[in-house]
Image (cartoon, helix red, strand yellow):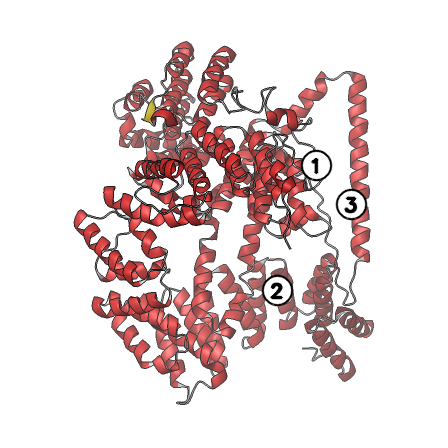
């Protein structure tokens, strides 16, 4: 490094390197300029100056200098290494790897370059290359522990656990008998446990247990030791010993569900599906009875049996479980029991039980069969539970009655207003839900969770401006909306993006959805620093778990939702390009108005340019002593206008579609979007592949049926094939059609009729049939609409005085209404449907129900005057907008001292 320079300049070059490492960039720059004054074409100095400038956010100059340095000294490993570092800083990992390989051709034994290369290979999951590089590092420096561990981990990641064990054993052979010293006990423990987990993963359970027992004196993490030992004993078919160990673990933590699961496995009483025979239920019940006597204070030992018990035993157990929690007033009780609503019959038992408790408390002040008087708050929490129960079952009128009674009982409990807000959301009145959530927020202005719930409700009601003002109450001063982005607040990005999408602002919607994708990219990038840190600190099991988590990162719900919504935006952009819409609008304007619009656009462009210039100036002035700029650049496209000006929306949609197909292959929405995108791109074989996947996942889904009919209708209407590719495509489709059971020896009309015959009582299936009937034969529009209107909203459960639950869901009815308006283009049928659904959903604003906030006499309508863009006025902090007197009770409250 700097070898071709005279001694004075060589020392200056060393100073540049030291200044770079200590982040004294101005000092390094000064030394580089001193060398370049005498040797202006010195490649390594040019490269190091470029690297220093890169750290000062002067990237353009940095790349120019480094490339010039490589050009001037193409055989210098330093120049190539520096160019690789530059690419790495910009996340151009593949280019960085190329540069590192060029550097290694010149200096193949450079440890620093090899280490940097191995980190990039781990990041990019180039596992074979990672193994090769780690082996080379170990060969060059075998006395370094990190090289042994790195080589073992590389073999493990490359699906060679047995080889990784051999490497660790070879490393242990180099250690002295008294190793490790006191200060390295934790690191050595991690290595032993990692080795045992490798043996377990490779199926050598006997050897793993033997290794664990052999190294016990050197293991300081006794909890992990016991957990691993219990797991291995269970896998080796030694249930008695495993049982004893799991009971020891339960005595340490009786609320750990994994220990109960392990204990059940010891007795052969564990099922992944949660389905058990009556004989196994008996045995499980006996097991948990004995455990409940031993661990009396454990919540888990009382909760777990509720998942497998049935009928009277379930009723008895759940009563015993919920009574103390209702007395104590635990708001999360319903959330705890909500999974039971997926078990047939259990919701009915729960309802019957809690209603009996309600009647008994009202009449006697005690639970049924008890003489102990309950506090007045018990009735409150019973009503609170019942409100959520009826909300879950779609009986919104009964739910609202219960929650209103609870509020009248104790108007100062914040959770009541939050739950009422949720019920109103489900009932279809988003404006009222937002108002109630805001009331709950005003009751405790220091509660961030309630503030977030309120923001979410406001966004669902399309009150974006008010939601933004409310959200930033809990962010730092300054650019508060950017703080939300920096905190990776993905629920906010999704909710605000949905709101903008509903309002037709595709630019802002895309901006929000792609922000979520950026968060996931950042999370993926954040693993980079751990490739060296975890090997150094020996947190090997956590490191491997983190890498596995990163590999499935894009399968998590937030990314899935954001990608789906972004694709829908691109589909909308493709179907109605913005430029043509603008041209249509301009053509309708008078000449004077056209001139005014053009002038306004020029003024906006000028103002935007001035703002960007000002931003650049402020960025240039915000430089720290080290020379690094502290000021963040201003977003040049805050409203997403550049995003919607994309030339090929389908190409952008395909990018996110590929990620969904890779990480969410079992999602119906993935293949629905694949069908939509490929049909627009006229890639019919890919569209057919999507149809086959839809039928495989859920052939009876209305959207699967729609896609099937649309596809073959489109194929049938295309021109006769002329090119070889088109002929090949047709022959493939002809060969594949018989494999689809829905179309075997049937026309599309017959397949559509058969689909209806299987789902005559389902509204969504009837709507899908009607839509396809109209699509196949437009002359049957009247018949199709009549079929929808003849649908019956049947009662599926009756609770006497407690109201009626019907089959139709609000979102399905709204979808049918939109179908009548936009596909059938029949405003009269849509109006009839709206009037009919307003009776079923009286709180729905979409159907203008008689109890919804759109009614003139609604308390939410009168108190919440919406402005033009759907936002509401922001009141002073602490003031509620509702005038129903529910917060009057606060006026008489006083703090006792």
Relative horizontal placement of residue 232, taking residue 32 as reference (left or right): left
Relative horizontal placement of residue 92, taking residue 543 as reference (left or right): right
Q: Determine contact: label 3, label 1, CB under 8 Å.
A: no
Q: Which residue is mark 2?
A: 84
Q: Determine contact: label 3, label 2, CB under 8 Å.
A: no
Front-most of residues 110 and 387: 387
Residues at marks 3 and 2, CA–CA distance in whole angstroms: 31 Å
Position of the C terminus by quadrant: bottom right
Whether residue 27 is situated above or below residue 351 in the rendered picture: below
Residue drawn 51% across and 20% down? 849
Position of the N terminus by quadrant: bottom right
- First-in-chain label (1 vs 2): 2
Whether residue 443 is situated above or below residue 194 in the rendered picture: above
Where residue 148 sits, quadrant-wise, is bottom left
> x, y percentage for residue 57?
72, 59
Q: Which residue is mark 3?
A: 612
Label 1 element class: loop
> x, y percentage for residue 220?
41, 78
Label 3 element class: helix
Q: Which residue is mark 1?
A: 875
Q: Determine contact: label 1, label 2, CB under 8 Å.
A: no
């Amino acid at each position: 490094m700097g070898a071709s320079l005279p001694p004075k300049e060589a020392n200056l070059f060393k100073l540049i390197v030291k200044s770079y490492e200590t982040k004294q960039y101005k000092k390094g720059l000064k030394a580089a300029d001193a060398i370049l004054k005498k040797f202006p074409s010195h490649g390594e100095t040019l490269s190091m100056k470029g690297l220093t400038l890169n750290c000062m956010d002067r990237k353009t100059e940095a790349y120019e200098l480094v490339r010039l340095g490589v050009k001037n000294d193409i055989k210098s490993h330093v120049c190539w290494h520096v160019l690789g570092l530059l690419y790495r800083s910009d996340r151009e990992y593949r280019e960085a790897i190329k540069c590192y390989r060029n550097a290694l051709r010149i200096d193949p034994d450079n440890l620093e370059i090899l280490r940097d290369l191995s980190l990039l290979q781990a990041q990019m999951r180039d596992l074979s290359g990672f193994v090769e590089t780690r082996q080379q590092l170990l060969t060059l420096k075998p006395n370094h522990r990190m090289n042994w561990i790195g080589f073992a981990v590389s073999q493990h990641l490359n699906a060679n656990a047995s080889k990784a064990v051999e490497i660790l054993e070879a490393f242990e052979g180099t250690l002295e008998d008294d190793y490790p010293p006191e200060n390295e006990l934790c690191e050595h423990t991690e290595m032993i446990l990692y080795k045992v987990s490798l043996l377990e993963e490779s199926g050598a359970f006997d050897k793993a247990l033997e290794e664990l027992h052999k190294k016990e004196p050197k293991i300081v993490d006794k909890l992990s030791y016991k957990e691993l030992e219990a797991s291995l004993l269970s896998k080796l078919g030694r249930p008695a010993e495993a049982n004893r160990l799991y009971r020891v673990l339960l005595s340490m933590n009786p609320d750990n569900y994994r220990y109960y699961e392990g204990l059940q496995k010891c007795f052969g009483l564990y099922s992944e599906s949660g389905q058990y025979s009556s004989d196994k239920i008996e045995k499980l019940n006996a097991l948990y009875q004995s455990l409940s006597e031993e661990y009396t204070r454990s919540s888990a030992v009382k909760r777990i049996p509720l998942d497998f018990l049935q009928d009277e035993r379930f009723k008895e157990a759940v009563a015993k479980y919920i009574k103390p929690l209702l007395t104590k007033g635990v708001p999360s009780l319903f959330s705890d029991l909500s999974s039971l609503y997926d078990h047939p019959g259990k919701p009915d038992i729960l309802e019957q039980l809690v209603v009996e408790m309600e009647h008994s408390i009202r009449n006697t002040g005690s639970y049924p069969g008890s003489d102990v008087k309950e506090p007045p708050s018990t009735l409150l929490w019973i009503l609170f539970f019942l409100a959520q129960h009826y909300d879950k079952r779609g009986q919104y009128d009964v739910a609202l009655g219960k929650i209103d009674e609870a509020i009248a009982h104790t108007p100062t409990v914040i959770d009541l207003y939050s739950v009422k807000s949720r019920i109103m959301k489900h009932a279809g009145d988003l404006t009222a839900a937002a108002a109630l959530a805001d009331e709950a927020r005003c009751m405790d202005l220091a509660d961030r969770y309630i503030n977030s719930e309120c923001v979410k409700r406001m966004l669902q009601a399309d009150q974006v401006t008010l939601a933004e003002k409310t959200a930033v109450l809990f962010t730092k001063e300054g650019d508060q909306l950017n703080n939300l982005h920096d905190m990776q607040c993905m629920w906010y990005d999704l909710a605000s993006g949905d709101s903008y999408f509903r309002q037709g602002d595709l630019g802002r919607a895309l901006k929000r959805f792609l922000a979520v994708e950026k968060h996931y990219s950042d999370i993926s990038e954040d693993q980079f620093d751990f490739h060296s840190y975890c090997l150094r600190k020996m947190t090997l099991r956590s490191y491997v778990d983190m890498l596995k988590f990163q590999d499935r990162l894009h399968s998590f719900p937030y990314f899935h939702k954001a990608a789906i919504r972004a694709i829908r935006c691109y589909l909308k952009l493709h179907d109605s390009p913005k430029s043509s819409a603008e041209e249509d609008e301009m053509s309708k304007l008078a000449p004077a108005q056209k001139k005014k619009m053009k002038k306004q656009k020029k003024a906006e462009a000028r103002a935007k340019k001035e703002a960007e210039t000002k931003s650049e100036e402020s960025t240039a002035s915000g430089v720290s002593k080290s020379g690094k700029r502290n000021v963040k650049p201003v977003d040049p496209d805050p409203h997403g206008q550049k995003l919607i000006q994309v030339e090929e929306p389908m190409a952008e949609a395909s990018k996110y579609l590929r990620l969904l197909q890779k990480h969410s292959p079992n999602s119906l929405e993935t293949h629905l979007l694949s069908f939509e995108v490929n049909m627009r791109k006229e890639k019919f074989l890919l569209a057919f592949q999507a149809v086959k996947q839809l039928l495989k996942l859920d052939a009876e889904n209305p959207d699967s049926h729609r896609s099937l009919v649309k596809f073959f209708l489109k194929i049938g209407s295309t021109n006769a094939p002329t090119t070889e590719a088109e002929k090949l495509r047709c022959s493939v489709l002809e060969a594949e059609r018989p494999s689809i059971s829905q179309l075997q020896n049937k026309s599309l009309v017959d397949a559509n009729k058969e689909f209806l015959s299987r789902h005559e009582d389902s509204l969504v299936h009837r709507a899908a049939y009607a839509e396809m009937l109209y699509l196949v034969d437009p002359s049957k529009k009247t018949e199709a609409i009549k079929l929808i209107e003849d649908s019956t909203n049947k009662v599926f459960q009756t609770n006497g005085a407690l109201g009626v639950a019907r089959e139709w869901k609000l979102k399905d009815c709204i979808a049918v209404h939109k179908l009548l308006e936009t596909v059938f283009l029949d405003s009269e049928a849509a109006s009839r449907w709206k009037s009919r659904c307003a009776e079923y959903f009286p709180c729905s604003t979409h159907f203008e129900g008689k109890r919804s906030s759109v009614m003139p006499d609604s308390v939410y309508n009168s108190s919440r005057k919406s402005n033009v863009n759907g936002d509401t006025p922001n009141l002073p902090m602490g003031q509620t907008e509702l005038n129903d007197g529910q917060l009057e009770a606060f006026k008489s409250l006083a703090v006792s001292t």
